Image (tube, rainbow, N blue to C red):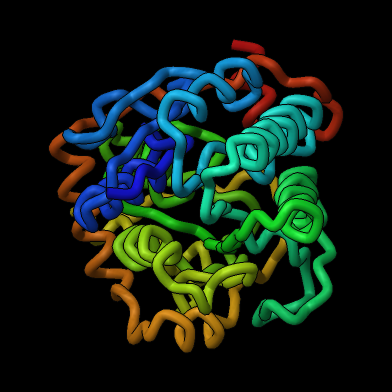
Amino acid sequence: MATALVTGGAGFIGANVARALLADGHRVVVLDDLSGGSPHNVPDGAVFRRGDVCDAPAVAALFAEFRFDYVFHLAAYAAEGLSHFIKRYNYTNNVIGSVTLINAAVNAGTVRCFVFTSSIAVYGSNQVPMSEDLVPAPEDPYGIAKLTVEQELRVTHEMFGLPYVIFRPHNVYGEYQNIGDRYRNVIGIFMNQALRGEPFTVFGDGEQVRAFTHIGDVAPVLARSVTNPAAYNETFNIGGDTVYSLNELARATADAMGVPLRVTHLPARNEVRQAYADHDKVRKCFGLTGETPLAEGLAAMAAWVRRHGPREPSVFDAIEVRRNLPPSWLAVLRD
């Protein structure tokens, strides 16, 4: 039985990957500081350790105790828009934490593969559909951080022989998502607003274009990537193909939640207008066919959020740069 470490395993994607690994017969250890996840998300059968990926001694001790075969690194603070205003926090969590894990994996000498969830944020704008052969040009600190870790994995493989698989998911939604995070995950934000009887908030005109990805199309692929030698030392986009404007998404989410559509348009923020990817490479490598239709995925998530109820939206109180912060976020901080 192989032993897998899942960082961020009390969070949304990590919890689903941990479930998929357990279903495949792996022993699973979850490491999470609970800054964005919940211990209730950790699946039965997994060993849970509360801790920070930036804590090098604690991480090294964990590797010594369990002698991991595989590392699934999903811990990150993935608020792309907010990353401009929390640069130091972003790079500490998303780069230093990742390097701490990479060092531990190399030093342990037992890790057969390191799986990393990056982001299509590495591509920047004006490169749609985004394909893996494009030259990355990230436009925000979050994308820069993810690209930095991708490059670190490549040089670590060249120097120390640590195999890796990099996935670039985008706009993932579904069950176990933290709908109380006001800075990221637009579908979760919409659903929480629906439960709270509030209008949906959209930055700008709502004609930004995205493709949305149900978690059921992502977690099993990540989990089984370590058993696919053809995936080793490769980078894959993974996610949905069908694109929607945020206005179209708002309508579909209102329908799924059974509420009338009410939208408040806020001042536009600095963001990529069109972001969607090409997935030919991941399909060929993993034999994937089709995707979960948006209406079906939204219905499944809506049923889950209704069972769990609304959340009080979180406030990130460690803003480092307030200049040009979206007015709605600034108003929250002043309350």
Residue 38, position as x, y percentages in the image: 34, 26
**Residue depicted at x 66% and y 45%:** 80
Residue nearest the observer in this picture, 283 or 141: 283
How many numbered marks have been drawn onto this rendered protein structure?
0
**Residue depicted at x 33% and y 25%:** 48
Q: Is residue 251 visible?
A: no
Q: Quadrant of the C terminus?
A: top right
Residue 190, position as x, y percentages in the image: 39, 46
Instruction: Choose top left, top right, bottom left or bottom right for residue 299.
Output: bottom left
**Residue depicted at x 44% and y 62%:** 226
Residue situated furthest front in the rendering: 109
Residue 261, position as x, y percentages in the image: 34, 55
Instruction: Choose top left, top right, bottom left or bottom right for residue 124.
Output: bottom right
Residue 149, position as x, y percentages in the image: 73, 49
Instruction: Choose top left, top right, bottom left or bottom right for residue 173.
Output: bottom left
Residue 204 in the image: above or below residue 246: above
Residue 151 in the image: above or below residue 331: below
